[in-house]
Image (cartoon, rainbow, N blue to C red):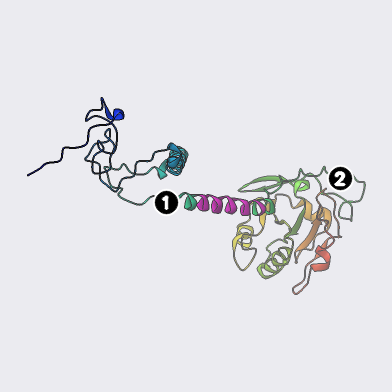
Amino acid sequence: MHLTPPPPASGDDEGNGPGRDDHHSRPRNGHRDDVPDDIPDDIHIPDDISELADDVAAYHAELQSLRRRELISKILPGLRPAPADRPAHRSRPAPSVIIAVLLIIISALGAMVPLVLAHPRPPAPARPLPLATTTAQLGTVGSVLPDITLRAAHGSRIASDLRPALIVLLPTACDCAKAVHDIVGQAHEGNPVPTYLLAPGADSPALNELTRAPEAAGGRALGFGDPDGSLARLVGADPQQPTLLLVAADGRLVQPPRVFAPGDRLEGWLGALPLR
């Protein structure tokens, strides 16, 4: 059998050994010599770094998202996520939920501002007016009450200090619970007028009953005793029916003394009292 020898190597192939980087020396699986043989075939190794631009952009976007979450966790600790090795026991509210709740609270506080402004604190009580100076005869319009001391269990008062006021001078042994009830009831219609019951004598059990009993003043008037009954004499009070005195804030009488009869209406008479 005749064997044909292989062709001799050309001049260009001299000196090349098995390590020459040509198609004869490449691995049959298509990999380069410097790449491990155990890399899966579905992994693509780019030849140019520009092919990784999308992956780099996604990586930076993830870093920015992580920084935002860390910032929110510092501002709102309740939003800090549970560690990966420990499951969260309850879900954390989303940032949008927290912001919505804060906006609702701010809106509610803003809605309360008009209510507060619409109901300001009540003004401080006005200082009493100085007592008027007059030469009018006692018991007439424009005159002032004398400095008579009136006494009661709750304290004493000077007659000229009862202002503004509706003063009811009660006769001795007054059987006038119904009249007192009508007088006090009308004095408290509309703008209430402070009402005082004055009885002759230093201590009158009947005065206490008239002041407190529901069928009389019902606690809407204060009672005082005139020890000598001097005020009733000075203004000429009726000895059998209640006599009314209407006193302005400066101490002046704004109406002549009036004897109250059952069934009388006092709207017009009380209407002469100035509000101040």
- Is 113 magenta? The answer is yes
Residue 214 location, quadrant? bottom right
Name the residue: 80% across, 68% down.
267
Q: Which quadrant of the structure image shows residue 206?
A: bottom right
Write the residue at 22% across / 33% down. 8
Q: Can residue 135 be seen?
A: yes
Q: Nearer the viewer, residue 182 or 164?
A: 164
Amino acid type indicated by mark 2 = Ala
Q: Position of residue 127 (x, y in %)?
A: 76, 43
Judge whether residue 66 is colored magenta: no
SS class, disc 1: loop
Q: Which mark is residue 132?
A: 2
Give whichever of discs 2 and 1 has the lower sequence position: 1
Is residue 69 placed above or below 235 in the rendered structure?
above
Name the mark on residue 93. Answer: 1
Mark 2 burial class by Cα count in 10 Å: few <14, some 14-19, many 20+: few
Position of 233 with respect to 33 (left or right) is right
Magenta range is 99-114
Q: Residue furthest left?
A: 1
